[in-house]
Image: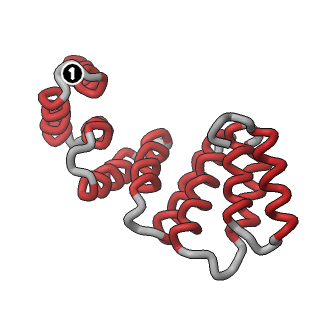
Amino acid sequence: MMEGRLAESLESFDIAIVNDGEAVEPRLNRAIVLIRMGEFADAGAELEAAWKFEGTSPLLRSRIAYHRALAADREGKLEMASEWLDRARSADPDAPDPILYSGVVLERRQKFEEAGKHYKRYLELHPESLVAMLRFGISAHRAGYRDLARRYLREVSARSPSGLEGLEARKFLIMWD
């Protein structure tokens, strides 16, 4: 899978599933391959089946739900993606990827205040994240918190004067002033 030999990877995971019908990890990996192949509905079905296994660790359940959200997003089902991200965060509240991705999906759903809360939570765990600062600033502005937005965007610009995040922050600062 890591080498991009997706068809061979599918075969390997299929064999692992046949050999151990209760194994969840091969189902998750099979679904990840399907996502990489653009087979989002099939990946979603595989992940939903994996979700139903009892006794799966919270960490693994979080990863299953996170990848189910990815598949739903790729299918254009943003509300479903949000629901699966909620499940991922419930299973492992401190898993950073579902927290950040929840903000992205909520922002795309134009739920800017909610998105901002997720970005802020991510920043509690990763205070140096320029991406989260940038997205928080943009969401804050769109939610009507303009002074807060300017403060965060200026911070991103100062920390990344020649980086993409800094450029994006400056673009919004110029556009809004």
Q: Quadrant of residue 135?
A: top left
Which residue in the protein does label 1 denote? 170
Q: 165 above or below 175?
A: below
Pick whichever, 20 or 40, lies toward us.
20
Q: Where is residue 62 in the image (x, y as percent from the top left)?
A: 54, 64
Q: Is residue 176 visible?
A: no
Q: Can residue 174 be seen in this view?
A: yes
Q: How many labels does the image show?
A: 1
Determine the residue positioned at 19% across, 27% down: 160
Q: 116 above or below 36?
A: below
Point out the image quarter for the N terminus. Answer: top right
Point out the image quarter for the C terminus. Answer: top left
Q: Position of residue 155 (x, y in %)?
A: 14, 35
**Amino acid type shown at disc 1:** Arg
Pick whichever, 23 or 174, lies toward us.
23
Q: Where is residue 117 in the image (x, y as percent from the top left)?
A: 32, 55
Q: In which quarter of the image is residue 118?
A: bottom left
Q: Where is residue 24 in the image (x, y as percent from the top left)?
A: 70, 67
Q: Dot 1 lies on which element?
A: helix
Q: 16 above or below 110?
A: below
Q: In which quarter of the image is residue 150?
A: top left
Pick whichever, 165 or 115, lies toward us.
165
| Relative horizontal placement of residue 9, taking residue 94 as reference (left or right) | right
Determine the residue positioned at 80% across, 62% down: 16
Determine the residue positioned at 30% across, 57% down: 121
